[in-house]
Amino acid sequence: MSTAFAPASVSQTAISSPFWSLIQTSMRTRTLPAIIDSLRTTGRAYALTWTKDSAPTTPHPFWDSDVYKTLEACCYYLMKTEDKHLREFVDESVKIIRHAQHEDGCVYPIGPGHAPLTRHCSYINSYYTVSGIDQRFTNLRDRHELYQLGHLCEAAVAHRVLTGTDDLLSPALKYVSLVARLFGPNEGQKRGYPGHEEVEIGLMRIYELTGRKECLDLAGFFILERGRRDGKGEIYYDHEARARGADPYDAWSAEYKHFYDYPRDYGYQQAHKPLLEQEEIVGHSVRAMYNLTAASDYALASGNTAVLAAVKRLYLSTVRRKMYVTGGIGSIERSEGFTDSFWLPDQEEGGCAYSETCASFALALLSQRLLRHELRGEYGDVLETALYNAVLGAVSAEALGGASDPASSPSAQRAPGGAGPAHGSGEGGVAFYYQNPLTTFSGHGKARSKWFDVACCPPNVAKVFGLLGELAYSYSEKEKKLAVHFFVSSEWTARGVHVKQETALPWSGTVRLTINSKSPVALAVRIPGWARDSYTSSVQGTVQDGYLHLPPRAWAGESVELDFLCVPRRVFPHPRTGKVEVAIARGPLVYCAEGVDNPSLPLHATGLVLSSPLSEEPPQALAGIPNVPVIVAKGRAVDESWWEDGALYTDEEERARWGEVREVRLVPYFLRANRGGDGAMQVWLKRI
């Protein structure tokens, strides 16, 4: 497959950054073992061994995907470091998956009007194996068989790269062939597509590995068929509902979901219109990002420029209208998704500020996929923002290699079924956020949880940090150009090029790139948006679309040094957000004020004095993470004692007057809720 900018592979990169190495080591030795323990304790790890007669319970419709994602993440870490615990889980899971596959000779109906399939069923799914195999593929909208297949495909690709064997790829390909026979535009095939996008990503991953056109064609069918209406204005989900004996128009039936605004609200699944007709990002935020990620990959492989234009259009709708300053997306809990442009409430009270961890994970990977098409600094900026803030902050400090998380200890969820703390957890344990609000109040802090009934986020966090090498570099064979997107001390060797990157980011903005090449190679380095007007470079080049471009040359150990000014700065919101506050950032990190650092300040009633300079305290260890700069701002708070009479509004001006100037301390958002305190936290603070 011809690729404009092919990303580095995990196996060809070596991460040496003290910051990121600490996190990767902790993911391998703490986080993944904790996830594996939860998979085993809750039954997920073994659900594929159950039968209708032997199952202790009915598996969740997408339990299998938690295993597949964890397996995939383990493979990435094993590519760099052998680990007995992870290896045992990988080998055990692959064995279970292979034995769970329904083999030749089975006879399963595939729905009204279609003949039974009698050969090569190759089906893998614990839910339908236990609840009734005759119902498979009858509810694509809600039951997520194809979503799970997508994660199986991604795991199979990672396992193939790790082991060089087809032990997992072979059953995945059998399952793909089954789906390719059942679904498509031809007579006798179902014109269906998944309710939760993901299989399209997995298909494209297998296509890139194997070149199997079956995968490319099936991915393209799912992407372009979604939202297509018949002459009655109906889509596939309407047809499959009727085949199940349900009325999709009935607002009082099970067909009407609580996250719909009205019956048949298929924007939730991005099926309200075909992709090429969509102008605004809508619906469930994770599904939307997965849809665009797959479409981006498909556009690259097929050369479909209309698909790429739609992806870019919807990406900009996301990051320029519906993204939090932290890289979070999805502003409402009810649909776990998008609402109107610029509507970005900060607190989760009232079902707002959902900002699901998986959505930011998906946004980061979509940004990386777009960088394969073209070098635009905005893509790299969004990737960096989401990774450092929304995703990194979704795990406890202990999971990042720091101290335990006392804030999560009192109210951290136990695993479903009464399971105890995950393996490797200290007092606070390896704990996670599903939602990532930008405001919490005193006495109502948000604790991380050990596990979730829907546990999509923990494996994705471990997965993305195992992929850092892929996010950092790419290479264009056509242009003979090396591109640097993400700044992390590391080395990459491929295609006759070796690059060594040295940097102390996120704390210090100096970056040194030392390059060796067998033939002339051009270089492109992203200039972060936060430093676009405040950086220096040791060499002259051309800046275009947020990248510094250097012409081709033979490299023999020469270095390029850049220094991005990494100092505290103020961030202001678009007026249409309705916010009149200010946020503080430093380099790629968004900061927040916490009650534990400001015990005498009511943070919800505190403003920052814009005319006063921002300063830093000497770097210190916070929650076990070393070298963290604490930012100090000047602020004032409203004296709430004026309001003790219970009034909600007043015309007495003195009640609203700001108090004396005080110091307000701010720490990186990703370290919030790790050090106790009263639970108060603010990213946005009022302007004075």
Image: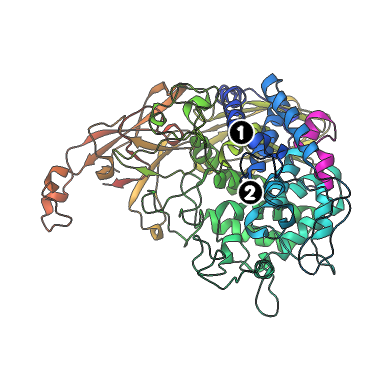
Q: Relative to the observer, which residue lies in front, 329 or 569?
A: 329
Q: Residue at x 61, y 33 (%)?
A: 39
Residue 648 vertical position relative to residue 553 in the rendered view, above or below: below
Whether residue 159 appears in magenta in the rendering, the answer is yes
Q: CA distance from mark 1 to mark 2?
A: 15 Å
Q: Residue at x 56, y 40 (%)?
A: 457
377 up-or-down from 274: above or below: above
Along the horizontal axis of the image, is 544 left or right of 576?
A: right
Q: Position of residue 541 (x, y in %)?
A: 65, 40
Q: Nearer the viewer, residue 288 or 258?
A: 258
Q: Which residue is mark 2?
A: 61
Q: In the depicted view, which residue is nearer to us: 448 or 606? A: 448
Give the amino acid type for the residue marked by disc 1 in the picture: Leu
Q: Secondary structure at mark 1?
A: helix
For the question of whether residue 286 can be seen, the reply is yes
Q: Residue at x 45, y 55 (%)?
A: 332
Instruction: Look at mark 1 in the image and give the residue it sits on.
Output: 39
Magenta-tinted stretch? 157-174
The percent coordinates of residue 327 (x first, y second) are 51, 45
Q: Quadrant of residue 514?
A: top right
Of label 1 and label 2, which has the lower sequence position? 1
